Amino acid sequence: MAHLLIVEDDELLRDALGSLLGQAGHQVSMAPDGESALAELADGRFEGVVLDLGLPRIDGLTVLQRLRVQLPTLPVLILTARDGVEDRVAGLNAGADDYLTKPFNGDELKARLQSMLRRSKLPAFGQADTSVGKDRQPLLRVDTDVPRAWLQDDMVELTQREWELLALLFRRQGQVVSREDVFAAWQSGAGEAGAMASNALEVYVHRLRRKLAHPALHIRNIRGLGYMMELGAR
């Protein structure tokens, strides 16, 4: 099992989470505020984070943003009472891999964490290259083992879900990838499917477009069907 950091300012809930995840076989460390969380994360020994947003000293969104600079691939699940669409979008934009609102079901939390951790450890796809000429550097390459890619010679750091979405589009470039195909690749929990369909997928597509900005690379929205990646000559 994994070594997890629980970042939660409510002592009773923090202890309950520690007990729940400890009984599930995880090694658990805890932080009561954002400053303590960043100090713990500086050691870089964790395999996953459960992060509240409403934290004292340093808020959870800022913790996530700083974490992503130093640990861009560390799986992070936001667990918060903030249930607005704008909060969810902000959390995903900041780099969260999953988002669960309070009150929550313990079994669902464990399942979400297990799915997130499994995605972080298993290569979900094979590598594929698109060449733009016999003696020329491929425009885009996708790593098979860790969440990163290369746009020409520049490495692009990706979150786990960005990586999986990119690989799916890349592997099926020139073909339409439906929303259902993406959710299946993400192995999302059934309880999240509606929310993911309504806003989160658009967030991830937007983030990929921003990170992979190039005049010969296009992620197109095919109205009513899904998305398509097209790679053209430079």
Image (cartoon, rainbow, N blue to C red):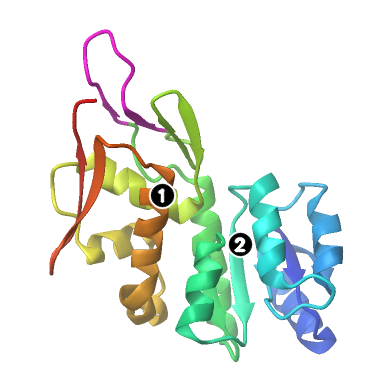
The answer to which image quadrant residue 143 occupies is top left
What's the magenta region? 128-142
Position of residue 62 measured from the top left corner of the image (x, y, whole percent): 70, 65
In the picture provided, is 42 more to the left or to the right than 120? right
Left or right position of 10 against 124: right
Does residue 25 appear anywhere in the picture? no
Q: Position of residue 131 (x, y in %)?
A: 24, 21
Residue designated by label 2: 76
> Which residue has dot 1 on it?
210
- Tell me: residue 68, above or below residue 142: below
Q: Depth-wise, is mark 1 or mark 2 nearer the camera?
A: 1
- Reply yes or no: does residue 132 show up in magenta: yes
The vertical placement of 201 against 192, above or below, is above
Q: Establish if 5 lies above or below 194.
A: above
The numbered disc on residue 73 is none
Where's residue 102, x and y in %?
60, 88
Please, which residue is most extreme toward the front here? Answer: 215
Give the amino acid type for the residue marked by disc 2 in the picture.
Val
Overall secondary structure of the magenta stretch? loop
Where residue 84 sits: x, y (%)?
Answer: 50, 86
Secondary-structure class at tag 2: strand
Q: Going 39% across and 46% down the picture, which residue do you hit?
A: 124
